[in-house]
Amino acid sequence: MTVIRAEDKFLPQIPYTPFAQYAGSSILREVVSRPLEGLGNNDIKLPVDGFVGHYTHDEKMKPVHLGVVSDTYELLQMRELTDGAEAAMFDHFGGDPEILDTVKVTDRSARKGAWVRRSYQVDAFAEKIDYREAGIKTGTTVAAKFDITTGFDGQTKTVLTCGLLDLVCDNGMVRMTDGDSVSRKHVKGTTADFFRTWMTDGMLKFADGIAEIRAMADSLVDPRAVDDVIKALPGMSERKAARMIQRVETEMQDRGRHAYAVLSAFTYYSSHDDVWFPVKKTGNDNVEDTLAARQAEVTKWVGSDAFKSLLAA
């Protein structure tokens, strides 16, 4: 079976940009739709109505089956999304190569490429956060992070997220509010144009997030009150709460007894598969999916009345 056909219409090759060095990434390989067929008696080919198969190729141009989806599935190439995000960054920084060349790009994939993500770490937005209120001389530095996630097997929406990343530790991004993310199923109208305005506006969201982080670092908390808050978080199980309380204690030893240390424990949970918070393996390459779900869970915790009570205390 041939994966790429002459009639397949793909995006034109992009001109040179500061991101051109990442243009050959495997997550940007084109995905195509193909009709499905079954075999009846005497090997008669039978069309499978209502469904199509999605395929890409490996580094040797061999076909890679990604999944079966409805024939109404709106196929959105990952490169359309990354081109839009990179154009928004280019415009926001006026094409300044001294800034754009410092943007760090990380690509991830799972399920043989049926799930893909590109992350941008934008150090141009980096700000120092101090822990002086907690009596700690050292502080940390947070930078902007922008994620694009999509999939091709019907299991993943297209999701764009902006948030903040602590550069001193290896914890993941925190998304402060639901407004820091936009998602859409692969239905008619799910095109790069749908996300383009949000991409542009996303460049303006980081200043507000920095102010919130600073407020947390200045908000000293009673560890006993933190225990009660963690137990009251949405969807928090007793077992997870016990582990989270222990993780908060570890963060507070390094950062001080403030609300940002609590947030740091949350972002550790959303970015690590380890002895603290192991991911239950299903044999279906599910770690990245699980961590993405945890990230959304942390956003709910940060926006909850329970967590906000720490800042109001």
Image: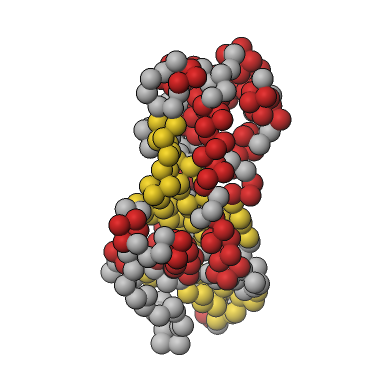
Quadrant location of residue 222? top right
The percent position of residue 138, horizontal first and vertical second, equals 37, 23
Toward the bottom, the furthest residue is: 7
Quadrant containing the N terminus in the rendered view: bottom left
Toward the right, the furthest residue is: 305
Residue 83 vs 285, above or below: the answer is below
Name the side, left or right, on which 141 lies relative to 175.
Answer: left
Quadrant location of residue 274? top left
Quadrant containing the C terminus in the rendered view: top right
The percent position of residue 238, horizontal first and vertical second, equals 63, 21
The residue depicted at 39 percent of the width and 49 percent of the height is 124
Name the side, left or right, on which 127 lies relative to 222.
Answer: left
The residue depicted at 34 percent of the width and 68 percent of the height is 17
**Residue 161 visible in this rendered orientation of the protein:** no
**Residue 100 visible in this rendered orientation of the protein:** yes
The residue depicted at 62 percent of the width and 73 percent of the height is 71
Name the side, left or right, on which 297 lies relative to 274.
Answer: right
The residue depicted at 44 percent of the width and 79 percent of the height is 10
Q: How is the image coloured?
A: secondary structure
Q: Residue 62 versus residue 147: which sits nearer the camera?
A: 147
Count of numbered marks: 0
Q: Residue 53 versus residue 304: which sits nearer the camera?
A: 304
Residue 25 vs 283, above or below: the answer is below
The percent position of residue 302, horizontal first and vertical second, equals 62, 34
The percent position of residue 7, horizontal first and vertical second, equals 45, 87
Residue 291 vs 7, above or below: the answer is above
Q: Residue 186 versus residue 261: which sits nearer the camera?
A: 261
